[in-house]
Structure formats: structure tokens, C-alpha cells
Image (spheres, grey):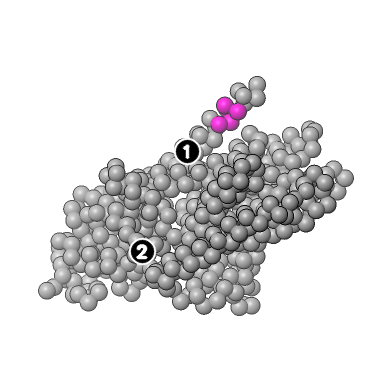
Amino acid sequence: MKSQAGIWINAGIILIILLSFFTFSENFYPLLNSDMAVNILMTPAFSLPHDIYFWGQDRSGSLIPLIAHWFYQVTGLQPVLIVSIVHYLVLCAGFWALTRFVKSGFGRMVVALAWFFPPWHFLEFLLILYGIQASCVILALNFLDRSFSAKARWKCLAWLSSGCFMFIVSVWVSDMALISLLALLLMGGLYFYSARKDPLKIISWRGLTVPAFTALIWAVTGFFLIHYAKGVSTPVQAYNSGFLASASGIVSNLHIALDSVIGVFLFSPENRIESVYAWGMLITLLFLVISKTRKIKTRPGITSSPWFYFFLFEALLTLMAVVTSGWVAANGAGRRYFTTCFISAAISLVLWLENLPEGHMRNKFRLAVLFVVIIGSLSGSLRFYYPEFRPSRIRVISALKYMGNIGIIAEYWNSYMSASPDPMHIKATPHEKDYVRNPALAVEVLTQPKIYLIKDGWLASFPDSIIQFGRTLRKKGHPVHIADAWLNRYEAVK
């Protein structure tokens, strides 16, 4: 019976992954934007060290286009499809790594829903770098845990080195992975302190000398690699002006976050299904706390379930870091910064439930959480299918592929996205007063045989002439409505 149940659970998880891919991957997502499209544009001509980070900044390592570029050279498939596949392969690798810690079928199903179908406010976990960051961190944890249980010294060091390497990749992908390292150190310190009092967890400090020295070598190597990567990339002053926000910035972060939370609990019109999810989760957690006060031990011990504490510490530390971050304050405390906090909290909740004592209360809690998480998943995906099906953005803007070799100048959110169906023949850039991530691409736009301006979000009307990047562009012909946007052809005056 258990094996049959396992087959159904695995089949359900595969179905969840496929549905997520055909809803949220770059090739199918109805709300594809220019930030997501940059990975697609980087893929065909990816080169190091120029593309070591996301265009125009010294943060957000380009792991997806790095891998996708190799697949593009081998297969020649459309970059948007390759990026979609690579993106989800990394997410699946992270989920697979997590199954080392989440043992039960119930837990894996809940984590699969939270991971591949997060609630509406946390969708950006899937869409941009935070899911990639979490996947790399959990892969690193998987390797570290394997090193702890390895019997042979060489296997221990091999897994330890793999884990350290993945942590370097994690920090390259996102500086926020440093919070995960801090959570790991905090969990490790608490574990070693508690293990001294547990006769079944006796630790030989002598046996830790070589692994500690190995980890130190990797830490030094990682520091110099990240330092080099930032040195050859484009510095962004706003990133480097200091981590901590001012008092007013912290208050602003808290105000925006609390307003959003209160709005969800008060059934704001944005997404009422998510409000049901929020109330259901709150009530379930309250019952968990009440059961603890009735002298039923619900919280696992640090020596028996150390990874529960890692994910709990990671969630709390991430929340503290986001609230006090100057960069988050400068960017309006966007909900994307809270996505890793959400996923860590979800994993820690699952590990908590897995460690509940046997009994009917555990089954009730598990069913309640599974039901609530399903509601949360619907809150983030249902609007793309009901009351009407929303086609992928790539399908809508693919009409531009039939215009041949063209250059496009537009407002940022309409620029890079416009080239994503065929970045080899469509060159696009934001206009010169917007956020131009790649100046070299702007030069390529002006050398295309046909140049178009998109006025949406930028121009009230198409001017007879306009100066862009030092060249005068003169209007030619009449406006046309293509790919859900207004375009007009222009030619560069020599």
C-alpha cells in the first residue's frame, strides 16, 4: 500500500511541475516582462566575463543564460524555450535536493505546491532569481548533509567540497544567500551546543579538523571569486551605498509590508482567494500553538531535526534583513524580496508537522495544511485560466518575428521583452533616458535595417523626428498596431 501511495504522490508531483511549467515558465507566462526577458536575450551570445552578472549591474549571477547558452549551441532551439527548460530544471533540482529533508509523501506534496504554485503575493519566487537562489542553497545543504553521513573520509570531503562550491554559486546568483550561510552557522552552533549534552550525539572535535580546513579554503576561494566577478561587472551605486536603511526607510518597509498583509486579511479586491488562504493558515498555526500549550510536544529538538531550525532561522533572518535593507526601501519594499522568507517558512512548517507525535491530531493538521496550501496555489494561478484563458506573452508578441531584422526602441518594460521571441533578428533597447542595461545592444538597434519605436508607456504620439543615442531618427509611414502595441517605423538620418 505504501509503495502504491508513493507512486500516486510522485505522479501528483510530476503533474504539479508540468502544470507550473506550462503556466509560469518564460515561454508560457502571460505576464512576461523585460526583467525576465533579459535572460532570454543573454542566451544566444553569452560571453564571460561581460555577462557574468545580469546586464547593467554587479548583482544577480547569470546562471540561467550560462547553462542555456550551451544548450542553445548544441540544439539551436529558440532561446525562450531553452531558458524555460533550464529554469525549471534548476527549480526541479532544488526540489529534488529538498526531498532529502522532507521525508513524507504529505510533506513533499505540500512543498511541491508551495514551490511550483506559490500564492499570488509570492509568485516572483518562480519568475526571477529567488527560486534559483533557493535551489542552489538547498542543493548545497543536500551535499553538506551527505558529507555528514559519509563513512569514508574521501566521500565526506568530496560532498563537503560540492556543498561549498554550491554555496559560492548561491552567493553569485544572489547576495541574499549570505543570509542562508548565517542561518547555517547559527543552526550549527546550536546543534553542537546541544549535542554536548546528548550521549547519543557525541561529536569528535578531532575528526572535524580536516573538514573545517577544507571549508575554510573554499570560503577564501569563494571570496576572491565573488570579488573578481564584481570587479569586472557594472557597479551600481545604489547597491553599494550601505546595507542598512535609515530609520525612515525601515519604517517605510514595515508600513508597506503591513499594509499588504492587512489588505490580504481584509479580503482586498486584488485576490480574495489568497485571503482565504491567509486566514486558513493563521487558524491552523494557532491550533498548532494551542496544542503545544496542552503539553503535547510539537516542536522537534535541534539534535533530532536540525534542518527544521535552519529553515526557521533562514525565514526569520531573511525577514529581518529585508525589513532593514536600504536597497529594499529604495525599491518600494516589493513583494519579491519576501519570497525566500515565504518558502523557508513553508518548509519549516512541513518539517514541524512531520515531527508531530503519532495520533489523529497529526493527520488532522496535515490535511488542514494541505487543503490551505491548495487554496494558496489557486490564488496564484487561477486568474490565468478563469474567467478566461490568458495566452502566453510570447505568443502575443511573436508577430514581431515576421518583420525581419528590426531594431526596437521603447519604454523599459516594453523593450527587452519585445525581442524575446527572436533575439537574433530582433534587437531592442529602452530609450536613452530610461534604464539601458546593455549600451552595446543600443548600438546594434541603430544598425538594424528597420527601426521601430513603441510609444506605449513612453510617448503621447509619434514625433516627426527624435534623437536617440546621438542619432536623429525620422518618422517613416504611419503607426501600426502589432503584438498588442503601437509601433511606427523610423529611419536614421546620416
Give the quarter of the image for residue 46: bottom left
Please tell me which residue lies in front, 188 or 281: 188
Q: Position of residue 258 (x, y in %)?
A: 64, 63
Task: Give, as a three-letter code, the residue at label 2.
Answer: Pro
Q: Position of residue 299 (x, y in %)?
A: 78, 47
Task: Give, as a three-letter code, the residue at label 1.
Answer: Leu
Please determine whether, in this image, residue 59 is positioned above or below residue 424: below
Q: Which residues are magenta?
A: 6-10
Secondary structure of residue under mark 2 = loop
Q: Residue furthest left?
A: 494
Give the quarter of the image for residue 99: top right
- Is 8 magenta? The answer is yes
Count of marks, rendered view: 2
Residue on which the image places disc 1: 19
Q: Quadrant of the N terminus?
A: top right
> Residue 197 got which mark?
none
Q: Position of residue 98 (x, y in %)?
A: 59, 44
- For marks 1 and 2 on the same chain, the one whose residue lies earlier in the sequence: 1
In this rendering, position of residue 391 left or right of residue 209: left
| Front disc: 1 or 2 | 2
- Residue at the spot 51% in from the left edge and 58% down from the top edge: 168
Please tell me which residue lies in front, 479 or 109: 109
Residue on which the image places disc 2: 49
Q: Position of residue 200 (x, y in %)?
A: 80, 44
Q: Quadrant of the C terminus?
A: bottom left
What secondary structure prevails in the magenta region? helix
Instruction: Report if residue 397 is visible in the image.
Output: no
- Residue at the spot 61% in from the left edge and 38% down from the top edge: 108
- Residue at the spot 46% in from the left edge and 55% down from the top edge: 128
Residue contact between numbered discs 1 and 2, judged by CB atoms under 8 Å: no
Q: What whole-number distance in Å separates the C-alpha atoms at marks 1 and 2?
A: 36 Å
Secondary structure of residue under mark 1 = helix
